[in-house]
Image: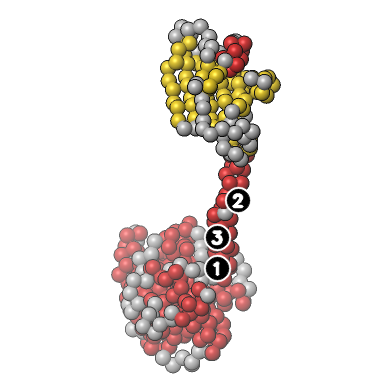
């Protein structure tokens, strides 16, 4: 009886934050997931799973229509999509050295040309996905290591290691192109 | 290049880089095909669950919901069970008997009387004086103290209503059967002293002594108890 009552309470005016996020960003998330998975059904699965994660992290989203929220949602759906991709392609466990040379699933070569990225931003964009997503959560969304670990289903120690390693990789690449010595 | 420099670079360029990337994605996503019916149905359901979670804290995942429902069922059933008097008393009894190592007796009065008439000892061992008395409509507790040794004698009587449940702590090291006023009585021995207890005139009477060596005197005190009027 309670369930029926709550169903009847579904009011158009009573849009929750979650519903707003869905209406605002579901297309963007589907696009990103499709870019990685190249399959509409898998992409929709990935978006659904991403939204399941977002439900439990709604408190991290203060404002629906803001860039930080957009970054956050894109990182979440990218991670879910990459996990599905890896699961379907049965990736083996690899070392950190191999991780750097691993094909970057989420990188779009057109974007490098068309998105007006400067040199440093291009290098950041071309970092392996595992480092880039942590950097975005840390430096754009200001998440703590613990929050990032919970979001990405990793241990806090792993996050710390990837942060450190990611910075090393970034430093090497910046040196290679002579941006910083 | 030190860590601070990299941190500064990341703090400066990550937000702008992410902005440009997501703007690019947003622009391109405008050309996405419409989602499937299945996806729309799934998302509608998820939105409803999210609303319930926000409003009523009902978990979203089915497994959690089932666990929450089972827990609610157990709590509701337990509360309903406890509200029934007889069962509640059984629960209390279980706690008392099992957890506190008490023994439960159920009494039935075999004396008819209109009111509680307390019994007082007409004999006391040497040097014992009354130090305290509590007399109520259904209870008497009198304390006598030996002015020389400090030993204490306590006479307690409680008027028992039919079917009263009495809980006694079975803390005695040993017990012995005896007879007081022709009625069955028990002498219990423990480190701190002795206790004689029996039933008479619809009351449960306990005479407690802190002096272990004076059993005969204690029995004599019990036998000397008489009605006050």
Q: Earlier in the sequence, mark 2 or mark 1?
A: 1
**What's the CA distance linking mark 2 and mark 1?**
30 Å
Using the image, name the chain to which the residue with label 1 belongs.
Answer: B
Is label 2 or label 3 in front? Answer: 2
Q: Is residue B97 above or below residue A75?
A: above
Residue A151 drawn at (x, y percent): 47, 66
Callouts 3 and 1 close, C-beta under 8 Å: no
Callouts 2 and 3 close, C-beta under 8 Å: no
**What's the CA distance linking mark 3 and mark 1?**
16 Å
Residue A118 drawn at (x, y percent): 33, 79
Q: B7 or B207: which is nearer to us?
A: B207
Q: Earlier in the sequence, mark 3 or mark 1?
A: 1
B57 left or right, relative to A142: right
Using the image, name the chain to which the residue with label 2 belongs.
Answer: B
Q: Quadrant of the N terminus of chain B?
A: bottom left
Q: Which residue is mark 3?
A: B76
Q: Which residue is mark 2?
A: B87
Q: B35 or B160: which is nearer to us?
A: B160
Q: Earlier in the sequence, mark 2 or mark 3?
A: 3
Q: Residue at point 53% right, 68% down? A: A99
Is label 3 or label 1 in front? Answer: 3
Farthest residue to the right: give it.
Answer: B177
Q: Which residue is mark 1?
A: B65
Callouts 2 and 1 close, C-beta under 8 Å: no
Q: B134 or B100: which is nearer to us?
A: B134
Q: Residue at point 41% right, 91% down? A: B30
Does label 1 lie on the same chain as label 2? yes
């Amino acid at each position: 009886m309670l369930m029926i009552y709550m169903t009847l309470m579904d009011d158009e005016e009573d849009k929750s934050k979650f519903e707003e996020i869905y209406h605002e960003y579901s297309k963007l998330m589907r696009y990103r997931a499709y870019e990685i998975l190249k399959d509409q059904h898998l992409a929709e699965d990935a978006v659904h799973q991403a939204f399941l994660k977002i439900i439990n992290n709604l408190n991290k989203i203060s404002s629906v229509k803001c860039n930080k929220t957009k970054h956050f949602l894109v990182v979440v759906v990218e991670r879910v999509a990459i996990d599905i991709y890896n699961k379907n392609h049965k990736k083996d466990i690899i070392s950190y050295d191999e991780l750097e040379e691993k094909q970057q699933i989420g990188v779009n070569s057109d974007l490098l040309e068309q998105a007006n990225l400067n040199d440093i931003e291009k290098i950041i964009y071309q970092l392996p996905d595992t480092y880039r997503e942590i950097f975005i959560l840390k430096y754009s969304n200001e998440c703590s290591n613990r929050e990032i670990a919970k979001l990405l289903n990793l241990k806090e120690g792993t996050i710390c290691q990837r942060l450190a390693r990611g910075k090393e990789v970034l430093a090497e690449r910046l040196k290679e192109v002579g941006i910083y010595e | 290049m030190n860590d601070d420099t990299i941190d500064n670079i990341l703090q400066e360029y990550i937000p702008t880089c992410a902005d440009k990337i997501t703007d690019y994605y947003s622009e391109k996503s405008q050309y996405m095909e419409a989602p499937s019916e299945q996806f729309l149905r799934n998302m509608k359901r998820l939105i409803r669950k999210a609303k319930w979670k926000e409003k009523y804290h009902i978990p979203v995942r089915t497994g959690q919901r089932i666990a929450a429902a089972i827990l609610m069922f157990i709590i509701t059933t337990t509360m309903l069970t406890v509200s029934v008097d007889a069962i509640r008393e059984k629960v209390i009894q279980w706690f008392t008997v099992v957890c506190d190592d008490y023994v439960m007796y159920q009494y039935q009065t075999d004396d008819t009387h209109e009111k509680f008439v307390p019994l007082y000892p007409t004999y006391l061992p040497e040097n014992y004086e009354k130090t305290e008395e509590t007399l109520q409509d259904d209870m008497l507790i009198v304390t006598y103290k030996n002015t020389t040794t400090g030993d204490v004698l306590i006479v307690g009587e409680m008027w028992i209503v039919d079917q009263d449940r009495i809980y006694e702590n079975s803390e005695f090291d040993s017990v012995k059967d005896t007879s007081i006023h022709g009625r069955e009585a028990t002498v219990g021995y423990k480190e701190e002293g002795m206790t004689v207890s029996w039933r008479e005139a619809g009351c449960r009477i306990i005479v407690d002594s802190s002096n272990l060596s004076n059993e005969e005197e204690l029995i004599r005190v019990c036998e000397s108890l008489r009605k006050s009027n």
